[in-house]
Image (cartoon, rainbow, N blue to C red):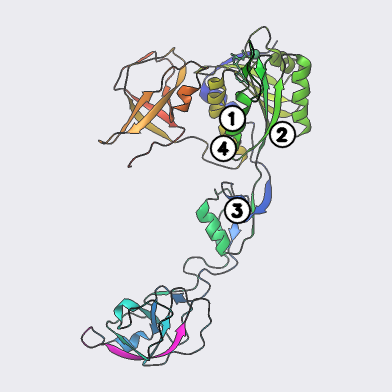
Amino acid sequence: MSRLEDLTVREALALVLARFAVLPAEEVALLEALGRVSAAPVVAGDDLPPFANSAMDGYALRAADLAAATRDAPALLRVVADIAAGTNPTTAIGPGTAARIMTGAPLPPGADAVVPVEDTDEPWRDEARALPERVAVYRRVDAGAYVRWPGEDIRAGQTVIPAGHLIRPQEIGVLAALGQERVSVVRRPRIGVLSTGDELIDVGQPLSPGKIRNSNSHAQAAQVIALGGEPLLLGTAKDTADDVRARLDTAVAAQVDLLISSAGVSVGAYDVVKSVLDEAGGVAFWRVRMRPGKPLAFGAYRGMPYLGLPGNPVSALVSFETFARPAILKMSGHDQLERPRVVAVVGENLRSDGRESYLRAVVSREATGGYVARTTGSQGSHVLTSLVKANALLIVPEGVREVAAGTALVALMIDWPGGVF
Ligand code: AMP
Ligand code: MG
């Protein structure tokens, strides 16, 4: 007989997370790294910018030549070169001379500053415009004005991205600028997804008496994909020990990092998943004091981490959210394992059964500031549409049975409300 342990959500989560470590690294092409976590520090091989260049379309010159320049008494300089971005200027800028220069073009030798075109009598950016022989400059600037110096952003040898850092579009930009075509990131977790139950038919099948379509396999696979993992769909096992065992063994052979099943872990007469796991040993059955949720199986099946979710679709989604999501994020190298939380004032009277409850709710930001939470309808664990309407799970703490409108509760944001912050 399996042990039946009573656990709080916090206790159960701690036991789950303790079983997972960050997965090994792999090298991927630059864009494949998006959303992944760096597995090694990235050290710059070059300075960025690599050379001194102009921050403006304007004229490169010597600041000393402008010491007395004003709008009424401009400095008149001879234009000796035209420097487009991507070229390598060789003409030196001597006293009394200037070069027309475009943003990002290298500062020519001898120049120590740039004056924007707006501060000259040649305020055109059009490169097709003929190069003037002279330019009048209406103001003085300090040496170094509008010049971007080499290494201002990044110095060669500097660590620009530490290990364990989330690769977002801005990190992709830095990596591209540094010429990193490949990036070492934490491998994606592979997650086996198994559904069980004689009542289940495939998505493409017509309904027949007593049957429902298997929604969990797809919902949990989608949850895995949304987290950057790779689902391995193991199909629907019949309520027979042989079928359940065969499919679990397929997952073992495929060496998944975690196997998730739904249904068959409570105490129903046909809950064969439980008996198969009992016989293999290594999996504990928990009664987690949460709603929706409660029955949860966790441990290892033939050495493979195993999480058995309840069968009801909302219970499966919320239990995944609560236990599988943080485990998958941890394996993927993330350190932020929790959803953002806000404190929201409840807009109605609520009832609970004393278990820690995750109520499907919409949290919105009021014009006056502050968040308000309203539940989205039936909280039955088979009612998917109230989760479809929700952007948050509103937490009613353990031991609380009644919540009066106006009470402040913590909401876990599964999406973020629109509006001004
Ligand atoms: P069980 O844990 O087997 O008692 O299942 C609890 C409830 O969840 C039952 O109403 C099942 O029909 C339903 N259920 C189980 N697995 C799935 C699934 N893969 N897709 C949709 N509903 C399911
Ligand atoms: Mg069943």
Viewer-side label of 1, 3: 3
Counting other residues with Cα less than 10 Å from the Cα at mark 1, is it few (<14), some (14-19), or many (20 or more)?
many
Q: Whole-Å distance between the Cαs marked 4 and 1?
A: 12 Å
Can you tell me whether the CB of the residue at mark 4 lies under 8 Å from the nearest atom of ligand 1?
no
Mark 4: amino acid: Ala
Going by the image, does 403 lie left or right of 44?
left
Residue in front for this viewpoint, 291 or 316: 316
Mark 3: amino acid: Leu
Task: Quarter of the image for the C terminus: give it.
Answer: top left
Residue in front for this viewpoint, 303 or 381: 381
Mark 1: amino acid: Ala
Dots 1, 3 in contact, CB < 8 A: no
Q: Which residue is mark 3?
A: 31
Can you give x and y, in whole percent of width and height, for residue 184 in the image?
65, 52
Q: Whole-Å distance between the Cαs marked 2 and 4?
A: 17 Å
Task: Quarter of the image for the N terminus: give it.
Answer: top right
Q: Which residue is mark 2?
A: 256
Residue drawn 56% across the image and 68% down it: 156
Mark 2: amino acid: Val
Viewer-side label of 4, 1: 4
Chain part drawn in magenta: 71-83
Q: Earlier in the sequence, mark 4 or mark 3?
A: 3
Dots 2, 4 in contact, CB < 8 A: no
Q: Earlier in the sequence, mark 2 or mark 1?
A: 2
Can you give x and y, in whole percent of width and height, for residue 222 in the image?
59, 33
Whether residue 229 is situated above or below residue 82 in the rendered picture: above
Q: Whole-Å distance between the Cαs marked 3 and 2?
A: 25 Å
Q: Whole-Å distance between the Cαs marked 1 and 3?
A: 26 Å
Q: Which residue is mark 4?
A: 226
Viewer-side label of 3, 2: 3
Q: Earlier in the sequence, mark 4 or mark 1?
A: 4
